[in-house]
Amino acid sequence: MLEIKDLHASINGKKILKSLNLNVNAGEVHAIMGPNGAGKSTLASVIAGKEEYEITKGNIFLEGEDIEELAPEERSHKGVFLSFQYPVEIPGVTVTNFMKTAINETRKAQGLEEMSAKDMLKKIREKSELLEIDRKFLSRSLNEGFSGGEKKRNEIFQMAMLEPKLAILDETDSGLDIDALRIVANGVNKLKSKDNAIIVITHYQRLLDYIVPDFVHVLHDGKIVKSGTKELALELEEKGYDWIKEEIKEA
Ligand code: ADP
Ligand code: MG
Ligand code: MG
């Protein structure tokens, strides 16, 4: 699904990613952890194609296609979803109408017809029930006056509606109470299938009690310095990141 090879990326001339390698297969959930400032959000932004970042070396392949030259919208139409893509408030546009537009724009870009109103309603009903989203919530203006938890829930709703091939959740857990956390995790777990892949970026192990990753990677100073299974996340929770820095120094 995703192959990142020797990726180097900068912002404002500052080198952030330094020879990062990562392979994510369909059907897998990967967690990326690491200290603040390691480059986790940069990695997510570079995969999504945010234009302020410059790739100075290396490649990003999505299903074998080099996507480096593609605009963020084009990547999104190919099935890349980054949480917090639309944090903006849009007064007068309801959650439902926003979702309809997002889905139909994606379908158009993929050469598909608009989804019928009936199918759209069915899908909205199905996904909102799955995520325990209240009907009233669907008719509210997008992000206007949303609490932190409501914003996160809306993101997960977008993800569930768009059914991306590659979903990247960047610290979707921060600021969530336990109930909201469970709903977010539930949404992610239900999205998971043999045909898609999910990357969960998190600073803390907590979310991984609910979303069990197949692989855990530690990002430190712009590269992945250690990979393992979910036990690695527990070890990080217990011991912090300093021992990894020591390991790197010794190596
Ligand atoms: P993380 O998500 O792991 O906390 P980030 O990817 O947000 O890390 O940041 C990695 C590094 O890039 C940090 O040192 C940060 O200060 C720097 N950085 C991020 N955005 C910018 C920017 N717009 N200009 C300059 N430096 C930036
Ligand atoms: Mg940070
Ligand atoms: Mg970050």
Image: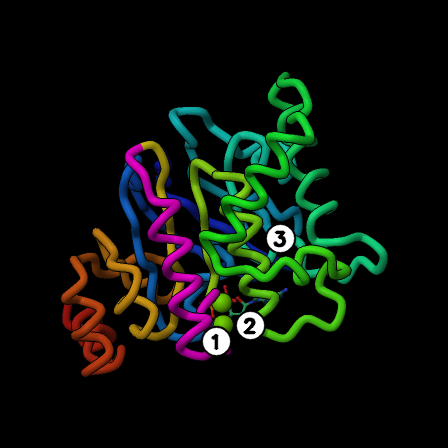
Badge 1 density bin: few <14, some 14–19, many ≥20, Cα 10 Å: some
Q: Are marks 1 and 3 in contact (CB under 8 Å)?
A: no
* Numbered mark located on residue 176 in the image: 1
SS class, disc 2 = helix
Q: Amino acid at mark 3?
A: Gln
Residue matched to label 2:
149
Image: magenta residue range: 172-194
Left/right of residue 29 with respect to residue 102 in the rendered view: left
Q: Amino acid at mark 1?
A: Leu
* Numbered mark located on residue 133 in the image: none
Nearer-the-camera pick, 236 or 246: 236
Q: Residue at x 39, y 27 (%)?
A: 63
Residue matched to label 3:
85
Please, which residue is most extreme toward the right here? 92
Magenta highlight on residue 175: yes
Q: CA distance from mark 2 to mark 3?
A: 16 Å
SS class, disc 3 = loop
- First of labels 1, 2 by sequence position: 2
| Residue 191 position by quadrant | top left
Q: CA distance from mark 1 to mark 3?
A: 18 Å
Left/right of residue 241 with respect to residue 126 in the rendered view: left
Q: Which circle, 1 or 3, is nearer the viewer?
A: 1
Query: Percent from the top left, x then y, of residue 153?
Result: 54, 62
